[in-house]
Image: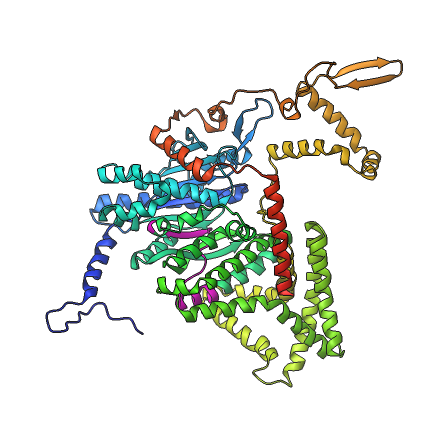
Amino acid sequence: MKRKDETKTDRGNGDEENPLAKEIEERKKRKKAKPYVYICGTMWHETRQEMLQLLKSLFRLDFHRSKYKIAEKVFKVDVDYFEHEIHIIFDDAFETDKISGQRLPNEWVKQLVECMEEASTSVARGHLTWDSKPTKTTTPYGGRLNWTMPGGTEMTIHLKDKDKIRHKKRWSQIMYMYYLLGYKMMGVNLEDSFFAKETIKRCHYRRIASILNQLPKYNVDKAHNSFILALDGDVDFKPEAVQKLIDKMKKNRKVGAVCGRIRPVGSGPIVWYQQFEYAVGHWLQKTSEHVFGCVLCCPGAFSLFRATALMDDNVMRMYTNPPSEARHFIQYEQGEDRWLCTLMLQQGWQIDYAASADAFTFAPQTFEEFFVQRRRWAPSTLANIIDLLSSWRVTTKVNDNISTLFIIYQFIILSSSLLGIGTVTLLITGSFNAVLKITMFDSYVVAVTPVVLYAIICIKCSNDKQIVAARLLSAVYTLVMVIVTVGLFVNLATEKSHSPNFIFVVEIPFIFVFAGFAHPKELMCLVHGLLYYLMVPSTFITLTVYYICNIHIVSWGTREKKTEDDIIAETESGNSTNSATPPILIKCLQNLGVLALVKERTGLIKQLLGTRVDQKSDDNKTKSSILPPIGATLVPRTERRRPAVRKDPDAWQSKEYFGLKGKENIKKEETDFWNEILDKYLIPIVEDKQKKKKIQKELKSLRNNVAFGFL
């Protein structure tokens, strides 16, 4: 209601123009400029179906671009579309070959290359005559595959070797942000500007914002009109959805990021639960944040970021910081997309939500995958909200879209989340009292006992046992919810409209139903709301206890399949601690015949590795000796593992599934860029055992403090 009508001019003394008129003219000019989008996806261990889903979306974009370029050329008119190029960052793409000892692409890279032709044919609905084999380039971080898609779009897949560059998703994002914004846009696109070249030579890549402030206005405008579309490796979307994100950006230059509507896909009750959860989260929470202030998180699955927002001082600089304290591992690594948005909000950028920009992504389908995923998300969400609340004075001053009332609103949401486990426990207590006719204290003891027992299990037992216990408790709580429902209706007859029971039974379902009818295309999500209702104790109690007690575990948890290198490392560590194996365990393994099998396999491995085994026979006894002769020099285990092999950086290009297409040599300027970035930000972290123990101790201490706080 406070917005002015920008179409009118306000003349004070008859000769003073409205200052908004100039802004309107600039907006019209900006609308004519075609946006440039760097489409960046991150991959790791996706399945074939997930890879195909992403590739089909990318080929749809390519055909969309081709169609509009033809229309523009034929009809001689300006068509509203966007130019783009595609980059996929493939994490941990190499493994050591057991025979040659060379670093070669793993099975997931082969799977991705094989999916190219199938994806293009599926989108084109017929056979396409295009070269589906890539051009290969060896790079300082591993390798690179380049395709020219049927519609002319350039697609590059960056293969990361974790022996050369830091792995995991956040470092992949830092890698492509510095490459695309720091090298391609700032370095290559500004070659015609001597001032820009000299600036880049003088300034450190880390100070991109400083360079930006010294560039000509034309280049700054170009950066404002350039965007990065962040994608997950399994997302499905249409070109229209990307255009809707861009439209949000074009309306307001203060918008630093825009997220779309994420829809989980899959089958099974766990996915049905998430479909309702995501629907309610977008219907109510995202829209509330969008209207009252700013969206707090743009998910990495499908979000658009403005180049200048990422370049802003204290955004990329902070985002490149490695974790040094226990809380950093939770805030930085467990939910990197939310942390990036927190940094942007604290720098004054606005984050919006485009409800009509739909994207589909595969959701966890098993109970364990769902719990492990939320074990990462929940602590990260709490950490970032607390970080935002702690800096509220500065944030409200620099960010025009975040007010003190919005901060209070977020504080209430945080408090409600912290009290959620106690609220639901008391709800169950009241129902036991009403239905089972036992005293309130006894009802409370019955309701709290499972929570305490499960907390002990989570602290003392392995993750597998925790998940089994959570499944059992969830099944029991489903039956408890039937009792709760009966108790609610029993109490409802005697209570007033402002009582908690009345609010829970009548008012909250009314909000969900109203929101569902306001979104007719998603009305079926309300059916899944019944399952959501039955799982309220499981998610508000069991899941909360699970992630609180496991907050010290900072591994990714999902899609973690061991590679050959991981198996070799585990085997070596196992051999080094073989003498500490408990006798009872050895006896059990002997009874199962496992040790005999292990010895047989070990003998074969030793023969393959060239270990000298001296056979000595003495009557009925056969003895094996792997000891060297007296006086011989003992060779360390790490040196005996595999014969020394000269590493050929181009060996990976010989894989037959890459085809016979020639290779390209990387430019010297780009090699220098990668060497600088790798040395300063992305060099693989060498594990320090003492520091690792210290961090683990700090994480456990943090876990204890958080658990005590919830208690």
With respect to residue 305, does 418 lie above or below?
Answer: below
For residue 299: magenta? yes
Q: Position of residue 158 (x, y in %)?
A: 44, 36
Q: Residue furthest left?
A: 15
**Residue 612 to residue 97: above or below:** above
Look at 44% across and 57% down and name the residue there: 342
| Residue at 34% over, 39% down | 183
Q: Residue at x 74, y 76 (%)?
A: 441
| In the foreground, 76 or 475 | 475
**Residue 21 location in percent, x, y?**
19, 64
**Who is closer to the viewer here, 414 or 485?**
414
Q: Which residues are magenta?
A: 283-308
Left or right: 489, with 227 as reference point: right
Percent position (x, y) of residue 388? 46, 61
In magenta stretch: residue 694: no
Task: Out of 38 and 67, give the one closest to the viewer.
Answer: 38
Asked whether residue 683 is in view, the answer is: yes
Q: Quadrant of residue 535?
A: bottom right
Front residue of 514/89: it is 89
**On the rendered structure, is 24 left or right of 114?**
left
The image quadrant where one finds the C terminus is bottom right
